[in-house]
Amino acid sequence: MKLETLFAFHFFFCYFLLLEFMKQSTAYTILFLGALFWCLLLFLPPASFYLSDSDGGLTQAAYQLYARICHQYDSHSIHLMGHKLGVCARCSCIYFGFFFGVLFTPLYSFDRIQNHRRWLLFAIAPMLVDVLLNTIGAHESTMLTRVVTGLLFGVIAGLILTPLFVRGVTEIFNNVSHNARNLYESKT
């Protein structure tokens, strides 16, 4: 079987699995679309600069949007068309990784794992070590370490938090609808 055929089969399998999962869970669909939208917004600064061909108001507004959550150092950022994304490389990869974790949750979920904290600590430890060693001067954090540690944390966080989010939102809406039904029945 050719690699292209295998890739196409895998893509369509994942696509249909994702669609089926989205049909079954409104909460998953909301989280998936929210993560996708957040990741697409990261491309707004370079895209707006490219489209307007100047450092206009939209570009600056996009950077200001993210300035509250990230240092946005130019040397620590991923660049597209000569302009940095809305956040630094580590933050970008955390968000992209989270999106991929949400995306792959239907294929493999950490929902069955009981100790979520241990997995999150495992995922965040390399990032904390990288930052700590860079801060004390024992090791210089590179673009590669920022990208790898950000992706690792983001993917695992997405895989762990997605089922928890879906279950929590489903329970809330089930309780609300149950209470509303009881209220309606008590008045009739």
Image: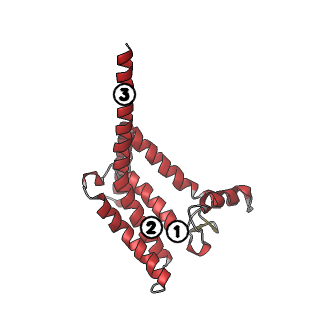
Q: Amino acid at mark 2?
A: Gly
84 or 168, nearer to the observer: 168
User: Where does the image place residue 14, in percent across and percent down from the top left?
Assistant: 36, 49
Q: Pick whichever of labels 2 and 1 is earlier in the sequence.
A: 1
User: Where does the image place residue 21, in percent across and percent down from the top left?
Assistant: 35, 42
Tell me if residue 25 comes above or below residue 104 in the rendering: above
What colour-coding does the image apply?
A: secondary structure
Q: Residue at x 39, y 19 (%)?
A: 184
Q: Residue at x 34, y 53 (%)?
A: 10
Q: Secondary structure at mark 2?
A: helix
Q: Are marks 2 and 1 in contact (CB under 8 Å)?
A: yes
95 or 7, nearer to the observer: 95
Dot 1, how many residues are within 10 Å of its Cα: few (below 14), some (14-19), or many (20+)? many
40 or 67, nearer to the observer: 67
| Residue 5 appears in the rendering | no
- Asked where in the image residue 25 lies, by quadrant, the reply is top left
Mark toward the viewer: 2 or 3 = 3
Tell me if residue 43 comes above or below residue 126 in the rendering: above
Q: Amino acid at mark 3?
A: Asn
Tell me if residue 136 comes above or below residue 163 in the rendering: below
Mark toward the viewer: 3 or 1 = 3
Q: Pick whichever of labels 2 and 3 is earlier in the sequence.
A: 2
Dot 2, how many residues are within 10 Å of its Cα: few (below 14), some (14-19), or many (20+)? many
Q: Is residue 188 left or right of residue 75?
A: left
Look at mark 2 in the image and give the residue it sits on.
Answer: 150
Q: Residue at x 56, y 61 (%)?
A: 69
Q: CA distance from mark 2 to mark 1?
A: 8 Å
Look at mark 3 in the image and give the residue it sits on.
Answer: 179
Look at mark 1 in the image and give the residue it sits on.
Answer: 89
